[in-house]
Image (cartoon, helix red, strand yellow):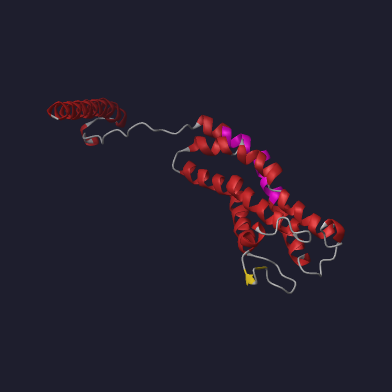
Amino acid sequence: MIAVANTLGLIWWFIMLFNYSKNELELKSNNTSVFPIVWSWGFLSDPAYGFTAAAYLASFVSGLFVTAPELAFYILSLVGETEYYGWYTNSIGYWGSIFLMPISPLLATLQLMLNSTNGGLNGNGSVEFGSNAIYIISLGFPIWFNSMAMHLVYGPRNLCYAIANPPNRDEPSPPCPLDEKDFDTPEAYLAQCEIVQASLKAEEQEGARSAESDEAAAEKTEGVAW
């Protein structure tokens, strides 16, 4: 379920990088239309629209620290690397989903509701940046609440699952060369296969050690020759 929340969060993250809900005008920097993530870096200190710029940057940061890493670790967990996903959803991702993700819609709320002397829009959504503030608020808070709830409920479960199912990084056993038809029962076949596979694996390891020793000896001889 956290993976679903992360997918929604990642979609929202990309939307916030590239989409501005205009009233009439496009976002511009140096008289050129730009994406919000580009525009926001130059307008953080703007007395009229600094809260909107900060909202975009806060969304960008929360995506970098919560949704994107967790989705990557979830994909790793599907191939057996469970420990990273279990750890992240109970540490950085856990606290980030609670305290970092709501910053963006909170800043948009300040942009909309504060009076103009404090850098807001006096609660007027019809002026420029008003529609965008409503858009960030209406989607940002549900995305945050969903992610927070999923981490609170499923984060500890992820950790328990990761502890109970640690990744298996042992070298795979060689295939069993025996024919099951030669044995009276499947149990006898499996038992004999384990013995044969253990022997084959030991031979492979011994061969690898021997190859390493030969390589080291060759390097030493080459060093003496020089």
Is residue 176 toward the left or the right of residue 7 in the image? left
Q: In this view, does 121 lie above or below 194?
A: below
Query: Between 174 and 205, which is closer to the camera in this rendering?
Result: 205
Q: Is residue 63 visible from the viewing direction of this image?
A: yes
Displayed quadrant of residue 129: bottom right
- Residue beneath the point at 51% across and 37% down: 84
Give the image location of residue 97, x and y in percent. 66, 44
Q: Nearer the viewer, residue 220 or 97?
A: 220
Residue 183 is covered by the magenta coloring: no
What residue is shown at x 71% (from left), y 42% (from top)? 99
Q: Who's the residue at 71% across and 73% down the image?
A: 25
Q: Is the magenta stretch mostly helix, strand or loop?
A: helix
Picture quadrant of residue 108: bottom right
Residue with the most extreme left position: 225
**In the current view of this chain or complex, which residue is farthest to the bottom?**
24
**Residue 138 position in % (x across, y down):** 75, 59
Q: In this view, does 59 lie above or below 185?
A: below
List x then y, in percent, for residue 137.
75, 57
Q: In which quarter of the image is residue 22?
A: bottom right
Q: How many labels, in total?
A: 0
Q: Quadrant of the C terminus?
A: top left
Residue 124 percent across, percent down from the top left:
85, 65
Relative to 53, does residue 81 appear above or below in the rendering?
A: above
Which segment did they paint magenta?
144-159
Q: Is residue 115 visible?
A: no
Q: Residue 151 lies in magenta, yes or no?
A: yes
Residue plotted at (52% across, 34% down):
162
